[in-house]
Image (cartoon, rainbow, N blue to C red):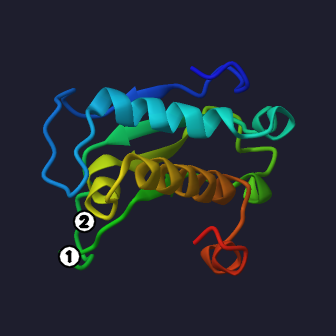
C-alpha cells in the first residue's frame, strides 16, 4: 500500500492475476496494479489523510446491474457515502466506501503503457473526487471527466 495513504485503504485485486488481455494494449494484472498504486502515490499526503474508510479494488470488468444498459462500460466506480454527506450517524458500523478500477475497459481504450498510466491516474483521481463529494459534471469541467 502506498505510504502516503492512511490505514484502511487497501488495494485488493479482484480477478485472476494473469498476463492475458483482449484489449489493444496488453498489460499484466501486476503491472496494472502497480499503475493504480502509483496513481494513489500521487495524491498529496494532506489530501490522502482526509480520506476516511475507503477500500480500493481492481477488477477486470464492470458487470451492468439489473436495469442498466447491458452495454454500460465503466473505467471506475465509487460506491459509498461522500464525506460531504456524512452525518454523525455514519461512522457507527458503516462499511467502507468502495472504489473499483476496471482493468479491461482501460486497456481497451489505450494504445500504449503511457496511455494506460494516464488513464489510470485520471480514473483514480475521478473516483477519489467522488469520495469528497465532487460531481461528474464538476469533474468534467475541471478536465478530470
Q: Are marks 2 and 1 in contact (CB under 8 Å)?
A: yes
Foreground residue among 20 and 102: 20
The answer for how far apart the CA atoms under marks 2 and 1 are is 8 Å
Please tell me how crowded label 1 is: few (under 14), some (14-19), or many (20+) other residues with Cα within 10 Å. Answer: few
Secondary structure of the residue carrying numbered label 2: loop
Against 102, residue 32 (above or below) is above
Total count of labels: 2
**From the viewer's perspective, is 77 left or right of 129?**
left
Quarter of the figure that contains the N terminus: top right
Quarter of the figure that contains the C terminus: bottom right
Q: x and y percent of residue 63 in the render?
A: 23, 58
Residue at the image point whose x is 73% and y is 25% from the top: 4
Q: Which residue is mark 2?
A: 64
- The quarter of the picture where residue 92 lies is top right
Against 69, residue 54 (above or below) is above
- For residue 62, the mark is none
Q: x and y percent of residue 48 in the render?
A: 76, 36
Foreground residue among 90 and 53: 53
Q: x and y percent of residue 15 in the render?
A: 23, 34
Foreground residue among 81 and 125: 125
- For residue 71, the mark is 1
Q: Can residue 95 be seen in this snapshot?
A: no
Q: Can residue 42 be seen in this snapshot?
A: yes
Residue at the image point whose x is 50% and y is 46% from the top: 99
Amino acid at each position: 500500500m502506498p505510504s502516503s495513504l492512511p490505514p484502511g485503504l487497501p488495494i485488493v485485486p479482484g480477478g485472476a492475476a494473469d498476463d492475458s488481455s483482449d484489449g489493444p494494449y496488453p498489460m499484466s494484472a501486476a503491472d496494472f496494479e502497480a499503475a493504480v498504486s502509483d496513481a494513489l502515490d500521487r495524491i498529496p499526503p494532506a489530501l490522502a489523510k482526509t480520506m476516511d474508510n475507503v477500500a480500493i479494488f481492481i477488477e477486470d470488468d464492470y458487470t451492468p446491474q439489473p436495469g442498466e444498459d447491458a452495454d454500460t462500460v465503466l473505467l471506475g466506480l465509487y460506491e459509498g457515502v461522500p464525506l460531504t454527506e456524512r452525518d454523525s450517524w455514519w461512522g457507527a458500523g458503516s462499511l467502507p466506501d468502495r472504489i473499483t478500477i476496471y482493468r479491461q475497459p482501460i486497456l481497451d481504450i489505450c494504445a500504449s503503457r503511457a496511455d494506460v498510466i494516464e488513464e489510470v491516474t485520471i480514473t483514480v483521481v475521478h473516483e477519489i473526487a467522488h469520495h469528497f463529494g465532487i460531481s461528474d459534471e464538476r469533474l468534467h469541467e475541471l478536465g478530470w471527466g
